[in-house]
Amino acid sequence: AQKITQTQPGMFVQEKEAVTLDCTYDTSDPSYGLFWYKQPSSGEMIFLIYQGSYDQQNATEGRYSLNFQKARKSANLVISASQLGDSAMYFCAMREGPVAGNQFYFGTGTSLTVIP
Amino acid sequence: GAGVSQSPSNKVTEKGKDVELRCDPISGHTALYWYRQSLGQGLEFLIYFQGNSAPDKSGLPSDRFSAERTGGSVSTLTIQRTQQEDSAVYLCASSPTLPAYEQYFGPGTRLTVT
């Protein structure tokens, strides 16, 4: 089974609107971390947001928020007030285990296009 | 401060040749990862190193691929007898043990096998 599933290969959003990028995960480890990365056309991977499995509140970082639904094993990324610069590939990832050094699993990504 | 660096940034090689890709992680980061990203695809885990522990090689696609990490710092990914399907961007990332949050990625090495 896939550890990380991103079912939206491509998404479009109007500038200034909000958009939700879906991510579901699969793990039996009670301790894990969930991450979102942005990859613009230039190729670099940019860390956006992190959610720990024991965190009680949804993570937020500026215009990014993570809608963490533990029982459903989903970790959707919400981008508010979309900007043209948000056009990029977005990857959801999971790290199993309590500390860094465990393997990271990445989804296949969602290509987001922001329309002016 | 200095981020993760990779060299070369681009490498074109002939089929059958060996190549070495280098990664310099952020100083003090104990974990180091190698990924492969084919055109338009997600990241494929290859190998990771954590401190002095034996590396997790479970993602290496064949015995033509190997990696080492010297002195707990610099890492080299070696591909022997390259094939055209090895063409991809090879990304390196490092991570501190604590806080165990994100990986810091290098700019990648674009490998083209002709």
Image (spheres, coloured by chain):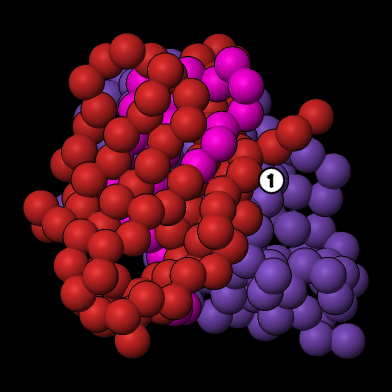
Residue B84 visible somewhere in the drawing:
yes
Residues A45 and A59: in front is: A45
Q: Residue B39: horizontal and vertical position, in percent?
A: 44, 78
For chain B, the rendered hue is: red
Residue B42 drawn in magenta:
yes
Residues A116 and A102: in front is: A102
Query: Residue A107 lies in what quarter of the image?
Result: bottom left
Query: Residue B71 lies in what quarter of the image?
Result: top left
Q: Residue A33: horizontal and vertical position, in percent?
A: 47, 30
Q: Residue at x 18, y 67 (%)?
A: B81
Secondary structure at badge 1 equals strand
For chain A, the rendered hue is: purple
Question: Which region is colored magenta?
Answer: B23-50
Q: With A68 as the anchor, is B64 left or right in this view?
A: left
- B68 relative to A52, above or below: below
Image label count: 1
Q: Residue at x 62, y 39 (%)?
A: B4
Q: Residue B51: horizontal and vertical position, in percent?
A: 38, 15
- The residue beneath circle 1 is A48
Residue A72 visible somewhere in the drawing:
no
